Image (cartoon, rainbow, N blue to C red):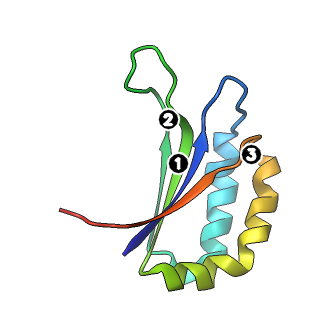
Amino acid sequence: MIKVSVMYPNSKDVKFDVDYYKNDHLPMVSNKVGDALKGLELDLGVASSVLGEAAPYVAIAHLLFDDVASFQSSFGPHAEFFAADLKNYSNVKGALQISELITF
């Protein structure tokens, strides 16, 4: 199992429409990638490890897939479409990381 994390960095000038991202963007992604998507989580940053400082990321979406190939084949054909939707919810581009998921 792999986890694809899309991390949106936080800053004083960041704009991020949580309602749009949660209710429109993520359901659209889920619909487009179909059954290849095994799970979806959204983390919303509330704080950092330093008292009084903002979280380093305003939001992080985690998408679960069986493997990198299933992610690439289901997400890849729609990647430009997903990226074009950014203007509807944020002024910062998310960094994408693919990780092997190990549970204990």
Residue position for label 3:
89
Local secondary structure at mark 1: strand
Residue position for label 1:
60
- Is 5 positioned to the left or the right of 73 in the image? left
Residue 80 in the image: x percent, y percent? 78, 69
Q: CA distance from mark 2 to mark 1?
A: 8 Å
Residue 8 found in image quarter: top right
Residue beneath the point at 23% across and 64% down: 103
Q: CA distance from mark 3 to mark 1?
A: 13 Å
Verify CB contact (< 8 Å) between mark 3 and mark 2: no
Work out which residue is located at the far top of the displayed protein and give it.
Answer: 52
Residue position for label 2:
45
Residue beneath the point at 41% across and 72% down: 2
Verify CB contact (< 8 Å) between mark 3 and mark 1: no
Residue beneath the point at 69% across and 38% down: 16
Q: Which mark is residue 96?
A: none
